[in-house]
Amino acid sequence: MQQNKNKKKSYRTLAAAMMSLVLVAGLAAGCGKKEEAPAAPAAGTETPANTSTGNPADVLVTYKDGSIARGEFDKFVNINMLFYPQYAQFKTDPAFQQDIMNQLLAFKILGSRADAGAKAEADKQAKEQMEQIKTYLGMQEGGLEKALKDNNVSEQDVQDFIGSSLVAIVSAEKQVTDDEMKKAYDERLAQDPAVYTTATVRHILVGTTDAATGAETRSKEDALKKAKEVQDKLKAGGDFDALAKEFSDDPGSKDAGGKYENVEVSQWVPEFKKAAVELPLNQISDPVETSYGYHVMKVESRSAKTFDEAKEGLRSEAAQEKIYNFLEKELPGLIQTNNLPKAEEPKTEAPAAEAPKTEEKK
């Protein structure tokens, strides 16, 4: 059973090529905090697919080494909408526009600082990512052509977007040193000795609540009694696959024989994680209680990533930190003019007026 953890998104998957909104959320919510979208428009308002009404040549922002015109900005927004259509409702929100602009500025400025090696590597990755994206969009209703047309962008626009994002990422990754990664690795191990542990676990969950509604399905006493019955069947040689399909209340694993294979144990709720780390291998456990109910478990394998095995993930996360730091600390000082609508400051109530003092009569 996996817990809902706020994990930073990877920059190396298909989503990596669509990663621009990761930076927006990171900037708006703060690095490492829960991502939050801007407030939805008021009821009864609609946001059309393309809200730009200004001259494409109008300069919106100037910065130390250049400027961004409305046409470039609108195209960048439209590409974001291509990958994240649910964000279209926020397209005219000033705070959202400011974050998108910061994102575009980050790509341009960090890309201009990248060396030839980073640009070559980014170009190679961009071509690979583009093929994945074309396949993904081709599977959607209307296919690639409709997706591009609906968002008023071309295939080359998308290719350029991917390339510019990856140049920034690859360049940041090249700046990460082994010492930085080793320090992060050691610090995490000190905080949690199981942070790099992965395990293959089979389990049968006898739940106490309905996963969809949260309604109680059985008492804890009844769940524990049934879990012990399942435990007895397994210890008597019962087939785990068959028993999981018959008794497990975990929809994510019951049809796979109750198996979670090579999973980072930190993704699981604390009680399940603790059992996955401490139980003897290949033995049927006593029922393990979690917030979901009671689990009868069998840990089939367990290993921990070495530093060398964890380096790629550590490098990616350290690169993300560098990009976030640029957005939060350096970028504001590089912007010279900004003609985008300003986000409204939250209103604060004035303190109540203090009653006038009267002089005490003697």
Image (cartoon, rainbow, N blue to C red):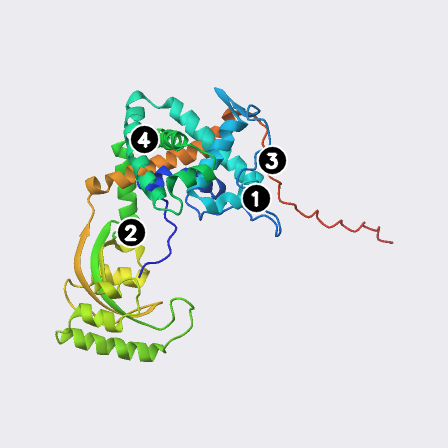
Are discs 1 and 2 less than 8 Å apart at CB? no
Nearer mark to the viewer, of 1 and 2: 1
Alpha carbons under labels 1 and 3: distance apart: 18 Å
Q: Is residue 309 left or right of residue 63?
A: left
Task: Assign a secondary structure to mark 2.
Answer: loop
Which residue is label 1 attached to?
A: 47
Q: Which residue type does callout 4 highlight? A: Val
Q: Residues within 10 Å of mark 4 (few under 14, many from 20)?
A: many
Furthest-left residue in this view: 237
Task: Assign a secondary structure to mark 1.
Answer: loop
Q: Is residue 241 left or right of residue 122?
A: left
Q: Earlier in the sequence, mark 1 or mark 4?
A: 1
Q: Earlier in the sequence, mark 1 or mark 3?
A: 1
Which residue is label 4 attached to?
A: 170
Q: Is residue 5 left or right of residue 242?
A: right
Q: Residues within 10 Å of mark 2 (few under 14, many from 20)?
A: few
Residue sitting at x 16%, y 57%: 301
Alpha carbons under labels 4 and 3: distance apart: 32 Å
Q: Earlier in the sequence, mark 2 or mark 3?
A: 2
Q: Residues within 10 Å of mark 1 (few under 14, many from 20)?
A: few
Spot occupied by residue 12 in the image (x, y as percentages of width and height): 30, 39
Which residue is label 2 attached to?
A: 192
